[in-house]
Structure formats: structure tokens, C-alpha cells
């Protein structure tokens, strides 16, 4: 399928630092950018087709995004490492500080995506997945796949089938693909659902969500979510969330000079003793002892 993407794009304060690399494939176009945005830089993007943006560095402290016109103040959120934007969904971005970045854009013809997804999940589920936006910060293997794809976009060395297969794997790993009932396939949460949940937990300074909020994040009922979450992770939602909060505590112990009592308050523990008990349960030692070991390395 010959395909030329037709995205409306307006930017201010963004400078391209190297020649743009791009490659047209079957029903899709891959574009690799190396650029820099100045403080106050902004952009507007609207495409009639779905697209994926994967950043190769963390831009969340520097770029905010919103899908509402004029919503940068009240409705903006940090730009994540990987974003899936459904067809016809506008995106506004704004730089809060100067930042150099590189990213891979994948412009995808809707019919090409349906042809790829429908044989495995059915047309209705494929259409539903293509309508659901996805934003994840923990890109994991997707970044590796994107790096391999950038090599083929920049300096094609293999048959186009190789690059198209990489795109297909990125799509299946990133999109939120569910069955017709909206329940996870095989009684487990999809990777996309877990990515959405991790991103939302990480966006909270205290790392706390109710089970109802966690279930709502992945589009499931609370009772069904609790069941499949345990099957997926081997932990209850609250056990898993406590582990994430202890991860945050460890980060603060290493990267800040906050007292343990201050860290406990910031992460929503009732007091220092409560944090110490939970910390010892998961890390095997007290926060104070763990901090001393880390500082002595």
C-alpha cells in the first residue's frame, strides 16, 4: 500500500539539529528526528491517521502536552516516552525548559493497522484499540525495537519486511488491545494495561491509588480487576502498589536529604514507624540502614 501521511503541524521554537531520516513502507512511514526545543517552544499536531511517537530520552520534565485547545494550564500533563495518538485527535505541546531530544514518529494508515490486527483479535477489537490513546513512561523493550527500526529508517540494510515486522511488534506491544467484552485476554492484564497503570501511579507524588481508581485506569470493574491483577502479577493490587511506594521511598532516600519522617509524610504513610515497617517487609531492612548502605557505596 503506497502511503503518504498528511499531518497538520505547526511549531515555534523547535530547531532540527540533523537531517531528518525517513522511510516509506507498506501503509506506514517512519521518521526519525534529532531536535532541540527552547523554553516556551510549542507545537500543534493533527493527523487523519493514527501515529506513534517514541522518545529516546526522558522529556517529561521539559515538555507538557494536552489534547484540549487552550488547555495547557489546566489540562496539561508531562509528555511520556511513548505516545499513541488515535486518528483525528489533536495534540498541543509546550516546552517548560530548553531540551534536546530525539524521537521516532510512526505514521500509520488505519487500513494497514486493521489488516495487521484483525486476524488476531477481530475487527471490532482492533477498531476499539485504534480508538484508545496510550501514553507510557516505562518503554522497556519498545525502546529497543524503536532503536532497531531507526537503523532501518536511517540506513536500510534489510528487506522492508524486517522494518514492517518491527513496527507490527511495537504496535502490538503499545496499543491497548482487549477482547470484545473489554476484559483482558486469557484472564490477564495486557502489557498496555499494565503500562497505563504504572504511568498513572508514577504520576502521583505519593504513588497511591485506590483499587477502584486502578481498575478505572485499565477500564475494568473493580472485582474483575482485582482477580486478573493477581493472576498477572502474583500480587494483590495493594501489595503491588506498596512495592511501588517503597521504590519511591528508596529513590528519595538516595536522591534527597529528606528525613525518613518527611519521606513517610510525602508518600502517605501514617508516620515514620508505618513506613519503617513496610520498608523492612519489602526491602529486608529499615530505611535508615538501607540509606547508610547506599551512601557508603
Image (spheres, rainbow, N blue to C red):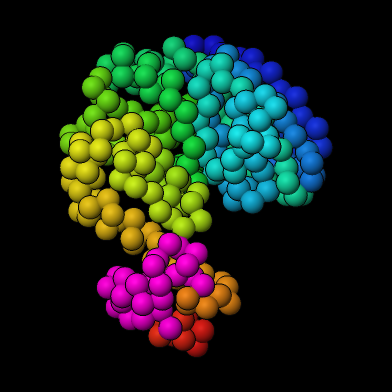
Front-most of residues 263 and 113: 263
Q: Residue furthest front?
A: 270
Could you tell me how many numbered marks the image carries? Answer: 0
Does the stretch in magenta take in 193?
A: no
- Residue at the image position 52 percent from the left and 39 percent from the top: 82
Q: Quadrant of residue 192?
A: top left
- Residue at the image position 45 percent from the left and 45 percent from the top: 200
- Image vertical order of residue 254 relative to residue 203, above or below: below
195 vs 223, left or right, is: right
Horizontal and vertical percent position of residue 107: 56, 23
Does the stretch in magenta take in 281?
A: yes
- Residue at the image position 64 percent from the left and 51 percent from the top: 61
Horizontal and vertical percent position of residue 48: 57, 14
Specify whether residue 151 is in view: no
- Residue at the image position 47 percent from the left and 67 percent from the top: 265
Horizontal and vertical percent position of residue 215: 31, 39
- Image vertical order of residue 262 relative to residue 184, above or below: below
Horizontal and vertical percent position of residue 234: 20, 53
Specify whether residue 89 is in view: yes
Front-most of residues 18 and 270: 270
Q: Which residues are magenta?
A: 262-288
- Image vertical order of residue 227 relative to residue 11, above or below: below
Q: Quadrant of residue 176?
A: top left
Q: Of helix, strand and loop, which mostly describes the magenta segment?
A: helix
Amino acid at each position: 500500500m503506497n502511503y503518504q501521511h498528511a499531518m497538520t503541524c505547526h511549531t515555534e521554537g523547535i530547531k532540527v539539529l540533523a537531517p531528518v531520516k525517513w522511510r516509506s513502507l507498506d501503509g506506514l512511514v517512519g521518521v526519525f528526528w534529532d531536535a532541540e526545543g527552547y523554553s516556551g517552544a510549542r507545537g500543534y499536531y493533527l493527523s487523519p491517521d493514527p501515529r506513534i511517537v517514541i522518545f529516546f530520552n526522558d522529556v517529561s520534565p521539559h515538555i507538557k502536552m494536552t489534547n484540549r485547545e487552550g488547555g495547557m494550564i489546566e489540562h496539561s500533563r508531562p509528555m511520556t516516552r511513548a505516545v499513541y495518538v488515535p486518528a483525528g485527535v489533536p495534540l498541543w505541546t509546550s516546552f517548560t525548559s530548553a531540551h534536546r531530544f530525539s524521537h521516532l514518529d510512526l505514521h500509520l494508515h488505519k487500513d494497514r493497522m486493521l489488516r495487521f490486527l484483525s486476524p488476531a483479535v477481530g475487527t471490532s477489537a482492533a477498531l476499539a484499540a485504534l480508538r484508545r490513546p496510550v501514553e507510557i513512561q516505562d518503554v522497556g523493550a519498545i525502546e529497543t525495537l524503536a532503536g532497531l527500526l531507526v537503523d532501518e529508517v536511517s540506513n536500510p540494510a534489510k528487506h522492508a519486511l524486517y522494518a514492517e515486522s518491527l513496527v507490527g511488534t511495537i504496535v502490538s506491544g503499545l496499543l491497548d488491545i482487549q477482547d470484545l467484552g473489554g476484559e483482558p485476554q486469557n484472564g490477564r492484564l495486557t502489557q498496555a494495561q499494565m503500562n497505563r497503570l504504572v504511568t498513572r501511579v508514577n504520576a502521583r507524588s505519593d504513588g497511591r491509588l485506590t483499587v477502584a481508581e486502578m481498575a478505572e485506569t485499565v477500564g475494568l470493574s473493580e472485582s474483575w480487576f482485582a482477580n486478573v491483577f493477581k493472576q498477572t502479577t502474583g500480587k494483590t493490587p495493594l501489595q503491588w502498589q506498596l512495592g511501588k511506594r517503597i521504590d519511591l521511598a528508596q529513590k528519595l532516600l538516595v536522591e534527597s536529604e529528606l528525613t525518613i519522617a518527611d519521606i513517610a509524610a510525602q508518600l502517605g504513610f501514617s508516620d515514620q514507624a508505618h513506613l519503617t515497617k513496610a520498608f523492612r517487609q519489602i526491602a529486608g531492612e529499615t530505611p535508615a540502614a538501607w540509606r547508610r548502605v547506599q551512601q557508603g557505596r
